[in-house]
Image (cartoon, helix red, strand yellow):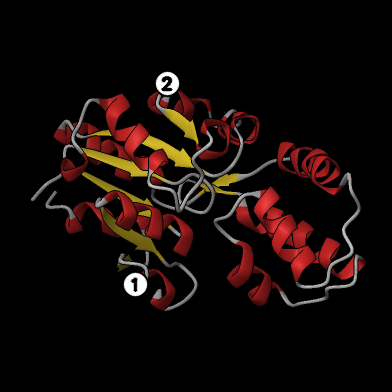
Amino acid sequence: MTPRAVLFDCDGVLIDSETACMDLVAADLARYGLPMDRAEADRLFIGGTIKGLCDKARDLGADLPGDWIDDFYSRLYDRLAQGVGLISGVTDVLDRLDAAGIRYAIGSNGSGKKMEITLGQHPDLHARIAPHIYSGQDLGCPKPDPGLWLHAARALNIAPEHCVVVDDSPTGCLGAANAKIRCFGLAEHDDGARLAANGAEVIHRLADLPARIGL
């Protein structure tokens, strides 16, 4: 069944910002006593909040200072402001959705300020999705809490069963499963097994989405 709305994650699905973020994370973990390669950092931390990352890293032995979260955000925002691109296929996919009368929104665990910085660099994209840009962190219901996806569906006035989610993290896919919303897991760089394990139907390019939803 063709959905009436698509609910997109932001980082790694629409905006190519995860590399910058995770490079900073990996460097900081090494600096504070928890060295790991990028693949392991991605596996452990992509899709969560920075507070959740901080708590988990400390549990694993990282000696992160008390002001690390605020300091990390400051450095991350500076890095993102230097420029981030779009994930391949974004504009074409939104064109297809518009032509079919399918609405869309963003649901991200990133902060609203972070999305202002990244989406603000792409004003055409920002204008197409605003005002339906939602932060689970700001709303107090970060993924895998189903509340973020359910909030986005309510804001569009479309029942969850008539929506689909697109996310690139196990956390986001699990949030969709918890919300009982069909989910497509975007796995551009691996086989997507971890996304499938959390209830997602795996796609390997965003451009594959229209065909999978009947367009």
- Furthest residue to the front? 59
Task: Locate residue 28 relative to residue 186 in the image: left or right.
Answer: right
Task: Locate residue 182 relative to residue 15 in the image: left or right.
Answer: left
Q: Name the residue that disc number 1 marks.
A: 196
- Residue 131: x %, y % from top left: 42, 21
- Residue 72: x %, y % from top left: 81, 46
Mark positioned earlier in the residue sequence (1 or 2): 2
Name the residue located 59 percent from the left edge and 30 percent from the top edge.
112
Name the residue located 36 percent from the left edge and 74 percent from the top edge.
197
Q: Please rate how many residues cluster around mark 2, counting C-alpha atoms within 10 Å: few if below 14, some from 14 to 19, many from 20.
A: few
Residue closest to the eye, 204 or 136: 136
Task: Tell me the distance, in whole angstroms, between the alpha carbons under discs 1 and 2.
Answer: 30 Å
Residue 22, which numbered label?
none
Q: Amino acid at mark 2?
A: Pro
Task: Locate residue 116 relative to residue 181 in the image: left or right.
Answer: right
The quadrant in which residue 92 appears is top left
Residue 145 visible in the picture: yes
Q: Amino acid at mark 1?
A: Ala
Name the residue located 52 percent from the left edge and 54 percent from the top edge.
12
Q: Secondary structure at mark 2?
A: loop
Residue closest to the eye, 18 or 86: 18
Residue 131, which numbered label?
2
- Residue 49: x %, y % from top left: 62, 49
Name the residue located 45 percent from the left edge and 53 percent from the top edge.
144
Q: Is residue 102 above or below residue 52?
A: above
